[in-house]
Amino acid sequence: SDINRTMINMGWFLRCIKYIVVFVSTSLTILVVISMLNSPFLGQFIAFGVFLFIIGYCCADLLTGTVHWFCDTFFNEKTPLIGKSIIQPFREHHIHPHRIIRDKFIEQDTTSFFALLPLLVNFLLNKGNDIGLLSYFLSGSVLIGLCVGAFGTNLFHKWAHSNKPPLFAIKLQKMGLILSPRSHKKHHSNHSQCFCVTSGWLNPVLDHIRFFHFLEYIIRFLFHAKKV
């Protein structure tokens, strides 16, 4: 029918948009890396650069974990606009956690590539004026860490569920650089903890201080949001 053909064409169109944005965001991130490698401050401040890369990577863990927590905690599958497209996949993952293994990368959530695209564009547009500034090198280091973590989150999450992830992914998991199956298993045994799925580094701290518990309390208090 015409409706089915329209839906199919719309699906292909949205997928093409995803491919384009993923390609552009990844390419711009590589350009930022090259810019940092050519920075006059690389040799003298490389330790600061590495430290700030780790800070950016931790920020990705926190931000993606917060999105994960929010979609696990608020609204439901029947919520207009976001129910089917955003909330439902998060809730279904709790019921069928291994289905994520079947999904191709482009079929997973690519929101981070869209969200960070303006930051990457703005950073590179200011390159001509700011490349000689130390602040440019330091902020670029944070941005690279943020992009690596945010762009890789869904892959790291997928590999944590996979019985046969790539060998390099297994090594990264064992080194604790990306989310490990053992670490992520805690979330699926208790859906009120361990929301961060990039590296999972922040989970012990956030769970210990009950960060998301208090954040939920504040949001429900301010907006009078009741549990569904």
Image (spheres, rainbow, N blue to C red):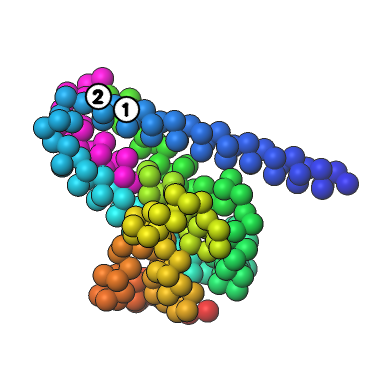
Gap in Å between the C-alphas at discs 2 and 1?
6 Å
Provide the secondary structure element on which disc 2 rests: loop
Q: Position of residue 208 (x, y in %)?
A: 27, 76
Number of the label disc, if any, that sits on residue 221: none
Residue at 30% across, 64% down: 202
Residue 34: image tag: 1
Is 102 covered by the magenta stretch? no
* Label 1 Cα crowd, 10 Å radius (few <14 / some 14-19 / many 20+): few
Q: Residues within 10 Å of mark 2 (few under 14, many from 20)?
A: few
* Count of marks placed on residues: 2
- The reply, left or right, for residue 6 in relation to residue 53 is right
Q: Is residue 139 magenta?
A: yes
- Range shown magenta: 128-146
The residue located at (15%, 41%) in the rendering is 47
Residue on which disc 2 sits: 38
Up-down relation of residue 131 to residue 16 (above or below): above
The answer to whether residue 219 of the structure is visible from this angle is: yes
Q: Amino acid at mark 2?
A: Asn
Residue 70: tell me if it is visible: no
Above or below for 137 versus 132: below
Rendering coords of residue 17 (x, y %): 59, 37
Image location (x, y in percent) of residue 211: 29, 71
Circle 1: element type: helix
Q: Are marks 2 and 1 in contact (CB under 8 Å)?
A: yes
